């Protein structure tokens, strides 16, 4: 059995177990960002409660209703985004590869995936993370396996992602061979 079949954690990944037919994610990363989204929702609910408990804010019913709909709507969006962040990751099976990002989910046939390599995701400095290379189409960054903390040296961060990308590539080769 290879190290992948045992679900070993790649060096330098701080908690991303690579295994077939299982979600591969850094639970500390996804859980922390989801918790921050839930905390944001709680803040919006607290503001809504504050608006309701102050007599000077509740004089005009129409204004109160619009304000509460807005505040609770933003809180609900924060909760939904938190759920989405908690589910981020990559799934590989013999038939397909699923990448669930913070805003979008991609489902690809195993044959459409060329491999994995370290790359930068996002605008500006970017977040170092594994990037799924497709045979046709744009590459897909795997946010859930990105680097934690503030990044000052992207070159070193990209080098630290090499073991994880190698394990993902090995798992992909096993999945392709099994079909």
Image (tube, grey):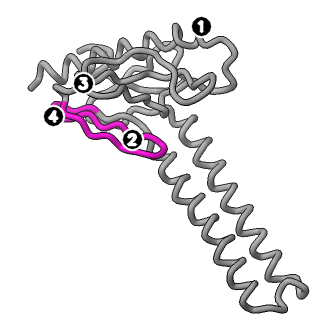
The residues colored magenta run: 92-109
Q: Are marks 1 and 3 in contact (CB under 8 Å)?
A: no
Q: Is residue 107 magenta?
A: yes
**Quarter assignment of residue 176:** top left
Q: Is residue 44 magenta?
A: no
Residue position marked by numbered label 1 in the rendering:
156
Q: Using the image, determine if residue 8 lies above or below residue 69.
A: above
The image quadrant where one finds the N terminus is top left
Could you tell which of marks 4 and 1 lies nearer the N-terminus?
Answer: 4
Q: Nearer the viewer, residue 18 or 160?
A: 160
* Relative image position of residue 76 (x, y in whole percent): 58, 66
Residue position marked by numbered label 3 in the rendering:
113
Residue position marked by numbered label 4 in the rendering:
95
Q: Is residue 88 left or right of residue 52?
A: left
Q: Main secondary structure of the magenta part?
A: strand
> Could you tell me which secondary element the residue under label 4 belongs to?
loop
Residue position marked by numbered label 2 in the rendering:
100
Name the residue furthest right.
56
Q: Are marks 4 and 3 in contact (CB under 8 Å)?
A: no
The image quadrant where one finds the C terminus is top left
Identified at 51% across, 36% down, the residue is 27
Identified at 31% across, 35% down, the residue is 91
Q: Kindly report the distance in space between the C-alpha atoms of the residues bearing marks 4 and 3.
A: 11 Å
Q: Are marks 2 and 3 in contact (CB under 8 Å)?
A: no
Could you tell which of marks 4 and 2 lies nearer the N-terminus?
Answer: 4
């Amino acid at each position: 059995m290879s190290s992948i079949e045992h679900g070993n954690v790649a060096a330098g990944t701080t908690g991303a177990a690579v295994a077939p037919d299982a979600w591969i994610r850094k639970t500390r990363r996804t859980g922390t960002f989801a918790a921050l989204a839930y905390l944001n929702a709680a803040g919006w609910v607290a503001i809504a409660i504050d608006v309701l408990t102050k007599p000077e804010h509740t004089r005009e019913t129409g204004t109160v209703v619009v304000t509460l709909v807005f505040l609770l709507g933003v809180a609900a969006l924060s909760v939904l985004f938190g759920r989405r962040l908690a589910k981020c990751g990559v799934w590989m099976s013999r038939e397909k590869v699923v990448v669930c990002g913070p805003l979008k989910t991609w489902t690809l046939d195993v044959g459409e995936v060329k491999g994995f390599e370290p790359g930068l995701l996002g605008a500006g400095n970017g977040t170092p993370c594994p990037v799924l290379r497709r045979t046709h189409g744009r590459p897909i960054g795997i946010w859930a396996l990105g680097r934690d903390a503030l990044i000052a040296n992207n070159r070193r961060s990209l080098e630290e992602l090499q073991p994880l990308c190698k394990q993902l590539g090995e798992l992909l080769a096993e999945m392709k061979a099994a079909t």
